[in-house]
Image (spheres, rainbow, N blue to C red):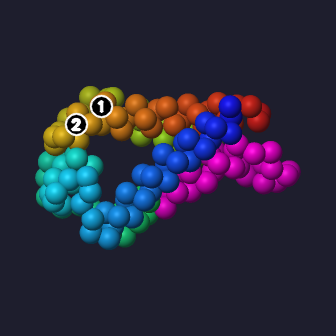
Amino acid sequence: MTLGLCLFVFAVLMTVAGLYLSWARGGHWPVSSEMALAAAVVGDPKLQRMPSPQRLRLIALAHALGALSVLALGFDLPGPLQLIATYLGAGFCAVFGLRGVLGFLPFWRKHFTAEPFNTIDRIIYSPCYVLIAEVYFSLISDRF
């Protein structure tokens, strides 16, 4: 069960990383324009464009590292690798949990008002990040 959960979260995070890499290369999927993509993904009404390709690549890298760390938590690793995986998992648990919880706070809602981001964030992005953080928490709590 644990490995299956790790593989599922790994797949989700790698998919997100792949999307950010695609956007860094100028792709617009799943919408038709960069302006529509910025409205759906970033949510800042002042932005008319996506962030820089370098920034998008960094976000993709962070999600890919998160994916690898959750995968590592699914296996029994030897000594120091187990400890490294546990601490990385704790860090990613905090980051993903914070992002998820922030999405439900009023100041976040006031700042990121662009639609459809506001609605998508409330229904999909924030709850998914909270669930991912819960998976991390479950996996690292078994190790302490």
Instruction: Using the image, determine if residue 47 lies above or below residue 24.
Output: above
Instruction: Using the image, determine if residue 60 lies above or below residue 39.
Output: below
Q: Position of residue 137 (x, y in %)?
A: 62, 33
User: For mark 2, what is the residue?
Assistant: 118
Which region shows up in magenta? Answer: 61-89
Q: Position of residue 46 (x, y in %)?
A: 13, 52
In this rendering, would 36 be left or right of 53? left
Mark 2: few, some, or many residues within 10 Å (few <14, many ≥20)? many
Mark 1: few, some, or many residues within 10 Å (few <14, many ≥20)? some
The reply to whether dot 1 and dot 2 touch (C-beta < 8 Å) is: yes
User: For mark 1, what is the residue?
Assistant: 122
Instruction: Name, please, the residue furthest toward the right.
Output: 79
Identity, as a three-letter code, of the amino acid under mark 2: Asn
For the point 48% across and 45% down, which residue is it? 12
In this rendering, would 93 be left or right of 29? right
Identity, as a three-letter code, of the amino acid under mark 1: Arg
